[in-house]
Image: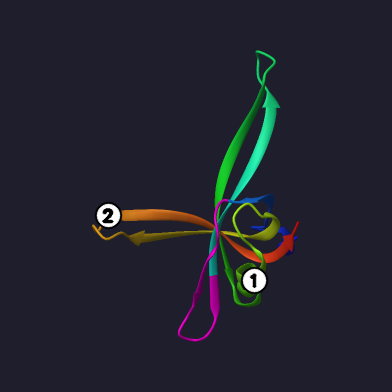
């Protein structure tokens, strides 16, 4: 059961071109957003589609694949773990961030 703890699987489309950074160590970091859609029929019988936006990060070889093959609108399947972090913005205000750290990526 340990291998299913804190695991997320999503299929969606990228919201923009990924931001790929090369760190001083030479390791790559990719940041991107992924939109997932859910549709249902409301009480009036009309189809409603809701979009959720997810912030993704990927490291190393996965980041390299993203840099080479992923652009805005690309459909992806990802698997990873949810991480939460806090930081201070430029004004000193405390901010919270929820991200999915991608372990596996499938280009659709």
Quadrant (top left, top right, bottom left, bottom right) of the N terminus:
bottom right
In the image, which residues are magenta?
15-29
Where is 64 relative to 24, above or below?
Answer: above
When asked about the image quadrant of residue 63, the answer is bottom right
Quarter of the figure with residue 90: bottom left
Query: Image point 68% across, 31% down: which residue?
Result: 39
Question: On residue 68, which mark appears?
Answer: 1
Q: Secondary structure at mark 2?
A: loop
Q: Residue at x 70, y 64 (%)?
A: 105
Q: x, y (%) of residue 7?
A: 67, 57
27 falls in the magenta region: yes
Q: Residue at x 60, y 34 (%)?
A: 50
Q: Main secondary structure of the magenta part?
A: loop
Query: Magenta stretch: residue 93 in it?
Result: no
Disc 2 designates what residue? 93
Q: Residues within 10 Å of mark 2 (few under 14, many from 20)?
A: few
> Where does residue 16 sit, x and y in percent of width and height?
54, 55
């Amino acid at each position: 059961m340990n291998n299913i703890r804190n695991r997320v699987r999503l299929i969606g489309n990228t919201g923009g071109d990924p931001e790929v950074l090369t760190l001083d160590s030479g390791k790559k970091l990719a940041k991107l957003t992924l939109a997932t859609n859910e549709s249902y029929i409301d009480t009036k019988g009309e189809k409603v589609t809701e979009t959720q936006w997810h912030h993704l990060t990927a490291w190393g070889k996965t980041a390299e694949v993203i840099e080479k093959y992923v652009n805005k609108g690309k459909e992806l399947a990802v698997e990873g773990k949810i991480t939460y972090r806090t930081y201070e913005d430029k004004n000193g205000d405390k901010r919270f961030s929820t991200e999915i750290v991608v372990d596996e990526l499938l280009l659709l």
